[in-house]
Structure formats: C-alpha cells, structure tokens
Image: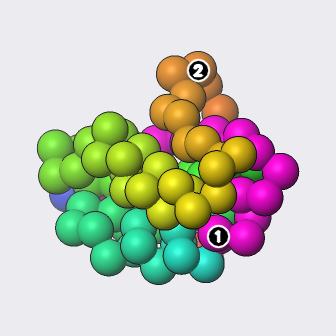
Amino acid sequence: MSCLSCMAFAMEERVTLMLTGATCTQSHTAIDSTLKQITGVRHVDLQAIPGHILVDIETGVVTADVLEDKVNNILATQPSCLAEIMKTCISSASRSARIP
C-alpha cells in the first residue's frame, strides 16, 4: 500500500444517522439526493442497515452535525421522523472494499 493510499483512507470517515419513525422511508429519495449534493460527501447508503443512513465523508470538509441538520430539514414534513447521529459503532463494508 502506498502512502497515497494511506492518506486516502485517513481522510475518509463514516457517519451513521439513525432514523426513528415509521414513515421515514418515504423521504429516502430526497435524503439521498440532498446528501449527495453536499461538498465532502463521498457515498450515501440508505439500504445497508434498515433505519440508518451510512454516509462516507471527507474528514474536515463536512461534519456529522451538518448531515443531521440537512436530513432533519427534509424529515420536517414527516412529523414522526427524526434523524440522530449515532455515537456508537456501526459498520458495513466500506464502499472501496466492495468495488472490485
């Protein structure tokens, strides 16, 4: 592994947002589209873990708080839905590990 590869991995982190509410899935398309437009967002996965959004971001470019705010702005139309940053560990195979 070259140093360039090490730097690429060091500059990416995963943010996990937990969705609570029975109708949150109705907003998945809007959430996906909105998050992908944010500078620093590399990948959005709404399917890997039900009720969660996994977002791979560039470290130092965007924060988990910004993602949480953007998603909650979308969910405001669904009064029973809320997105919260998960502070505990949750994981799925990284996007780069899944790409051959």
Give the side of residue 68 with respect to residue 9, left or right.
right
Residue drawn at point x = 50 percent, y = 33 percent: 85
On the image, the x and y values in percent for residue 30 come to 53, 76
Disc 1 marks a residue whose amino acid type is: His
- Please check the rendered image and state whether residue 74 is part of the magenta-colored stretch, yes or no: no
Q: Which residue is mark 1?
A: 28
The amino acid type found where label 2 is placed reads: Thr
Q: Is residue 41 above or below residue 6?
A: below
Residue at 42% x, 45% y is 68
Q: Is residue 11 visible?
A: no
Relative to residue 20, is residue 93 depicted above or below?
A: below
Q: Which one is closest to the eye, mark 2 or mark 1?
A: 1
28 vs 40, left or right, is right
| Percent of width and height locating residue 84 | 54, 35
Residue drawn at x 42%, y 56% as measured from the top left: 73
Q: In this figure, which residue is indicated by the disc labeled 2?
A: 88
In the rendered view, tell whether residue 72 sits above or below residue 37: above
Name the foreground residue: 74 vs 44. 74
| For residue 7, above or below residue 96 | above
